[in-house]
Image (cartoon, rainbow, N blue to C red):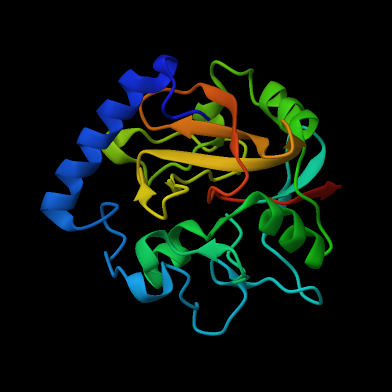
Amino acid sequence: MNFFTLTKLGRTLLLTAVVAVGLLSVGCGGDDGGNDNPANNGSNNNGGNNTVGNNTCTSGGSCKSKEMPDGKKWLTENLNIETADSWCYNGSPDSCRKYGRLYTWSAANATCQSIGWRLPDTSDWNRLVAAAGGQSTAGKKLKAASGWNNNGNGTNETGFSALPGGFRGSNGGFNHAGNDGNWWTATEYDAGGAYYRDVYYDDDYVDEDYDDKSLGFSVRCVKDA
């Protein structure tokens, strides 16, 4: 990322302030339930089910998906299959049901492959963003029509239904649910880092950056239609 670079410092401070206000009023992550579980560092189970939203998603089953304007088939909900190196935001199963799980880069790759899909690379994301109107405005068509803080919702014209699941930092802390969504790509920056895409509540820009593979981000899988 870096969330801590000078170019993003202003945005990070703003989002942190918004999250802090949300924590005081309704609990962690807005309406995530705030069921923190330090004993398992947020890696609690999800009722024993491998689910994407309310849809069973296993190697022998099907996932909720749609052909997007780029001609590829994408999951239309964040991946929510419990694996090693994946977490519910703040340890709350309600957050997993709402936002899906947050995965390390390696876990994201392996989990998509385990259900017969793949983690999209930067070229997949480039095509999707271009088909949705381009980097500066595609967020509007990709974001869900509800669920984003401060009425930062999109039109969801594509049916992608992007939700702001936030992220899990390298120190194990959870940040920015309700404010931004971050999705791994399969493309590596170097041995320790990989690229991801992110969308924020306060604009429609689809950003590209890179960060450490140990961070926990949301996941969408893709396959040829």
Name the image quarter holding residue 184.
top right
Residue 142 % position (x, y): 56, 35
How many numbered discs, if any? 0
Residue located 59% across and 26% down the image: 209
Front position in the image: 29 or 75: 29
Residue 51 % position (x, y): 60, 72
Residue 78 % position (x, y): 57, 55
* Left or right position of 33 against 47: left
Can residue 133 be seen in the rendering of this structure? yes
Residue located 80% across and 73% down the image: 59
Residue located 35% across and 43% down the image: 176
* Left or right position of 70 against 86: right
Q: Is residue 34 above or below residue 185?
A: below
Name the image quarter holding residue 150.
top left
Residue found at the very far bottom of the displayed protein: 48
Residue 199 % position (x, y): 49, 32
